[in-house]
Amino acid sequence: MFSKWWWRKRVGFEDITTRVTPECHFWVHWGASHCQTRAQTRGEWQLLCVPGGQPPLWKFMDSIGSEGLQQGEEALSCPEEGLPRPSDSSELVQDCLQQFKVTVAQLQQIQASLLGSMEQALRGQASPVPAVRMLPTYVGSTPHGTEQGDFVVLELGATGASLRVLWVTLTGIEGHRVEPRSQEFVIPQDVMLGAGQQLFDFAARCLSEFLDAQPVSKQGLQLGFSFSFPCHQTGLDRSTLISWTKGFRCSGVEGQDVVQLLRDAIQRQGAYNIDVVAVVNDTVGTLMGCELGARPCEVGLVVDTGTNVCYMEEARHVAVLDEDRGRVCVSVEWGSFSDDGALGPVLTTFDHTLDHESLNPGAQRFEKMIGGLYLGELVRLVLAHLTRRGVLFRGCPSPALLSQGSILLEHVAEMEDPSAGAARVHTILQDLGLSPEASDVELVQRVCATVCTRAAQLCAAALAAVLSRLQHSREQQTLQVAVATGGRVCERHPRFCSILQGTVMLLAPECDVSFIPSADGGGRGVAMVTAVAARLAAHRRLLEETLAPFRLNHDQLAAVQAQMREAMAKGLRGEASSLRMLPTYVRATPDGSERGDFLALDLGGTNFRVLLVRVTTCVQITSQIYSIPESVAQGSGQQLFDHIVDCIVDFQQKQGLSGQSLPLGFTFSFPCRQLGLDQGILLNWTKGFNASDCEGQDVVSLLREAITRRQAVELNVVAIVNDTVGTMMSCGYEDPRCEIGLIVGTGTNACYMEELRNVAGVPGDSGHMCINMEWGAFGDDGSLDTLSTCFDASVDQASINPGKQRFEKMISGMYLGEIVRHILLHLTSLGVLFRGQQTQRLQTRDIFKTKFLSEIESDSLALRQVRAILEDLGLPLTSDDTLMVLEVCQAVSQRAAQLCGAGVAAVVEKIRENRGLEELAVSVGVDGTLYKLHPHFSSLVAATVRELAPRCAVTFLQSEDGSGKGAALVTAVACRLAQSTRV
Ligand code: G6P
Ligand code: BGC
Ligand code: BGC
């Protein structure tokens, strides 16, 4: 083989020497002309250099092993003799075109391999690096059709060496379209290959030139940027270019945020104040421009100079997003798909040649078999090959036929179009400097058809992979979906789409797919995304404004803590205070020596329970839940207490206790001024109870009177306790440090062991007494009005005790659902939710149960389950709506938990200061459905207590047996004390 040195001196071409490898191209300029040749993987080309200035000779061994010599210049000349016999040429043609034949098995393998790569990339697998990128686009919802406004759209990269500026007006009225105004600008080659700044300045100039011709203001323009290259998006308006494709290779752009580059260029241009609101891939624009139809458009396919697809993927499947709710549009970037196993067998020598000659050898291999930028080149390489073999144009190639890029997509589309007719093909070939015969025309059309058929089939195999992915993602056996198609190959190529559709049906038979051509190449779609982005941004601003009052900061919570401390002090002193600080006559927590059988009643929570509590070395409980119909809870007091006694009697009968007069402890979860352990004057009803003739009465007397009314029943009512006290006692039985009782259920309240000396109105200075704070009423004096929102006011106004229990109405289970419902009504009226459609259901009181908050906010619940809950409420919602409803629930429950935490912080700090301790370790017995079932409530309460009472180590003990056990223990303590005083 010739030494490197000789070459260099002989022909004096720098780059040739460095690229001498078996696979290299050789360029030799010989006088005016040049010829090119190369070594093929399936053949060897050797340059035989003849000393003394003779044109070089080429020796080659092609794939079918025949050898031949060719003189450089002679390559352009027509062979005089030795054209192949007709039989040879059809074999030659067969051999050549056979390479483009792709079997169903090969297509299925490509489908499977691409699906595998897609799922690897979705999982965020790093190695082996997946063959496709699967780039999230931050477009989370398909358009509502309500988008409206005027938008500027800049399209760069979709159609190769041109960019387009559009003015798109969205009317927001379904089916009412305003034709976009647009202008196309050809991008000079040197700009496509020059400095990035030059390209963006060119784009900004085109923008101004276009807008100068439009009757538009220079201010407040919103622009959607369609940038058709692989990008890492980190937001709807932040996108970093990964690598150029399709004939672009500007410097200083890869790795940069292209939105910022455009903003900078527009700034430099300085003509217009344009807000670049969104950047999208052209496939996303195509998807979003899809007319609303019978079935959702969930896939956007583009085959133009390049090719790519996007589709709506479940966000939880996109590992990089760490989102487990909603859907997100993912740009597959299948142009880079290159799995040797699957693609190797279908890659032809012409594909390799094309790749070697491309701007980005080795990259975008799949795109180079399908994209419009390459179809023409593939056809050209095949025609050049067949011409050199004398099969076409009598073996006489034209310079154009040997020039890269001389056959364009348009040529191929026309030459293949049966309606174009042979005459048109003739003209095109003549324009390429060829003199075709009829047989040439027919063979050229065949080559075009072969190349394009393969392209459509490969595209179909890839699309079938995406459809299979959608099925997996939606866990559906069959799939009904619409695919929006865009790009000049789809639009202009006569048979591409029909082959595509036919092959998809073959490869994905369980998918019922409709193809919807994009009306205007995605411009509307980009405007839609921009409108969606602008709308989402506007909605987000309105949502944030609405929820801002619920986001309490440290100072606000510390203020609540301080106000509560003040109200506690006043209440203990018997002064006017929204906190009544009611003495409960419970002076001690159980010491474990209690024994006996006790009956207990538990009224005031979600359920009314009758319990038999057996206290030995441990506590055994038998209980039964009875309902308190609203008519009884809001009927007459007599009716209510007769109902209670009926339940007791029923329970005694079932437990074989009839006729026994066991000591009874009565958990009565309403504010009572206790005059003794077994005397409690009901101050006012709360939580939806409103039985008449009870307020101001001794509840124990009302119970005893009902027992009396029911002959033959004997009950010994020993104690009446509040559910907070029962809960404290019940937990105190296990943990003696438990000195606080907290209920966050239907209502909310707390009690704690106060120093007796601090309790006005109860004789004695030593020892402790449990104080029922009735903190539900905190703020009834207006001290919480600064935190109260219009939604709280609506809930309060609609309650049966307006102006009362203000703290409870911001925290407890009976009200949180209603607060959420009122916020949803408000956001709907602003058009932020449910497309502004107010539904009858949502206007129904108590339709949004507080338990929905616990369900909706649970981490384990996928968005679709959240959606199911809301759809059961008859709410027409999108994934954006669902995400916003979730945020509303989170804001309301977070405020409730923080306020509750501020209350507990006030209590533990009071106890710590009572005892003059630096540090306090104390336990809180807790009960209540909201606290127990809400996924984050308890941890938010604990976090707020840690923040506001850092010197208190607070342990929260969830009560297992409810306060009925506590009532029995209070009764047992009372009996023990009574016993000890009797002996
Ligand atoms: C438990 C207690 C009741 C208390 C209730 C509060 O069930 O035993 O005494 O009233 O919790 O929670 P709830 O969510 O039922 O209102
Ligand atoms: C780009 C894609 C684009 C496609 C169609 C490809 O070269 O990488 O981002 O969607 O062409 O324009
Ligand atoms: C009542 C309290 C009770 C709390 C929890 C409030 O509505 O006023 O007495 O402890 O609900 O059930």
Image (spheres, rainbow, N blue to C red):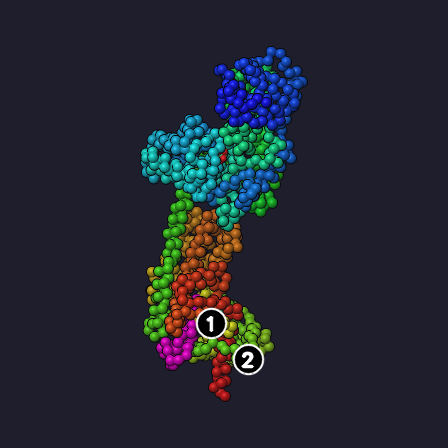
Across and down, in percent, residue 922 comes to 45, 70
Is residue 360 visible from the viewing direction of this image? yes
Q: Is residue 228 magenta?
A: no
Kind of element beneath mark 2: strand
Front residue of 512 and 755: 755
Residue at label 2? Answer: 596
Residue type for callout 2: Gly
Q: Which residues are magenta?
A: 748-775
Across and down, in percent, residue 19 comes to 53, 27
Does 167 sit above or below residue 380?
Answer: below
Front residue of 295 and 859: 859
Residue at label 1? Answer: 738
Give the mark toward the camera: 1 or 2.
Answer: 1
Residue type for callout 1: Cys
> Quadrant where the N terminus lies?
top right
Give the residue displayed 40% in from the left and 43% down from the top.
534
Graded by Cα atoms within 10 Å as few (under 14), some (14 to 19) or many (20 or more), the crowding at tag 2 reads some
Is residue 217 visible from the viewing direction of this image? no
Give the residue displayed 48% in from the left and 15% down from the top.
32
Graded by Cα atoms within 10 Å as few (under 14), some (14 to 19) or many (20 or more), the crowding at tag 1 reads many
